[in-house]
Image: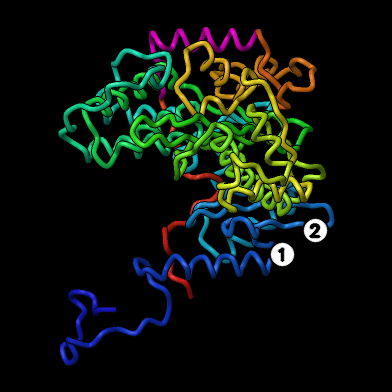
Amino acid sequence: MYQPAGFEDPEKPHHVCRLTKALYGLKQAPRAWYDTFSLFLIEFGFNCSKSDPSLFIYHHQGKTLVLLLYVDDILLTGSDQELLTALRKALNSRFSMKDLGMPKYFLGIEIEAYSGGLFLHQSAYTADILHQAGMTECNPMPTPLPQHLDNLNSEPFSEPTYFRSLAGKLQYLTITRPDIQYAVNFVCQRMHSPTVSDFGLLKRILRYLKGTMSMGLVITKDQNINLTAYSDSDWAGCKETRRSTTGFCTLLGPNLISWSAKRQETVSNSSTEAEYRALTAVARELTWLSSLLRDLDVPQHQPTLVKCDNLSAVYLSANPALHNRSKHFDTDWHYIRERVALGLIETQHISATLQLADIFTKPLPRKEFVALRDKLGVLVPPTASLRGNVSNIVMDQGPKDKTSPRVKPISQEHMKTNSANAESTEKEAPCCNKEDNGPLQFDHESSHPAVP
């Protein structure tokens, strides 16, 4: 590296320094830090996950520790308190660490624990976005987008960089707000050349967030640890390119763990073709999730059920016969067929009224939107429930028919409560005062420490 300013060797002013260890600020520093920390964990007995290199897992004699590393912030949990204490002591003896206790705030995500599980939300982050947009006093809207998206061609928006900044922040907000995933994906597709109409849609999302700022994702305790997925697609929904939008969500037991809304890369000639592509997309996601769960010692002992409301796509995924209408399908799309043949995935046809992924493919009327939002676990739990009683947010079993979704629907009483809460917040958004508790569990004192 160049000699630091003010410390140049007067006899050799044009010489450079040869480093003997990693130094903060160099492009190699993060890698050197990761190699040092991961080697320490491996020597302790951890194994690095094959599905996520930042995830380290310890299994020994029925005891488990799980450590997630993000640069120098650490999430740590485990089944044995003595082993956790031993790991903390070992970390403190090797690195300069701060134990921040139970997680409350991590990477912009606020974490509230209650007797039945966790409540993840980004209320403070939402308030920051509204403040940046100058919309802290705006009138709330009941849905993120209008049901009909027409007349979007207007004059160019005068501040495209500002538009992109807000859209990027909304993308990060979808980590705990799957209810805005489709809307954010839609406006992000317009970032290259936003118009005044596009900015109006972005402000519509912000108005919706104003009325639902305290909402977040509820993760409940449950004995059911089976993966389930819902796959859906519109057909030629984009008026400009006539491309379709893939939407899917995956659940572990009753809890939503991943979701996506993404425009397909090419035009589909039929709704079956569009739905078949969506099935392939969710099959790829399930392959990764199954691998991650195996690393966590939560293997799936039965085929993962993927629910789709297009009967032809379901038949096509299980039947390798050649059809005139599908012979042009690219071989890449047949990944779902391979997973079904191997017995790793089972596709099932369901009614469109039970399709949870519908919220990721199109704008919906208010009634349908709120119902799906509640079923996905995006709720406004009563404050008392988060501090103790969880009876109000436990999901019931729902109708016991063969086509009903495996996810446990929210109880009717609580659905009414949440709908009422949502309507009240549309009139007056709740005030959110965030107590900044810093990163979760451990915090290294420097972002890229020198490695000996």
The overriding secondary structure of the stretch rendered in magenta is helix
Q: Is residue 427 a member of the stretch shown in magenta?
A: yes
Residue nearest the observer in this picture, 148 or 224: 148
Residue nearest the observer in this picture, 371 or 209: 371
Q: Which residue is mark 2?
A: 60
Image: 112 above or below 399: below
Q: Are marks 2 and 1 in contact (CB under 8 Å)?
A: yes
- The residue lying at 36 percent from left, 27 percent from top is 127
User: In the orientation shown, which residue stands out farthest toward the bottom?
Assistant: 11
**Region in magenta:** 413-432
Dot 2 falls on a residue whose secondary structure is strand
Residue 278 is drawn in which quadrant?
Answer: top right
Q: Is residue 18 a member of the stretch shown in magenta?
A: no
In which quadrant is the N terminus drawn? Answer: bottom left
Percent across and percent down for residue 427 are 38, 8
Image: 152 above or below 427: below
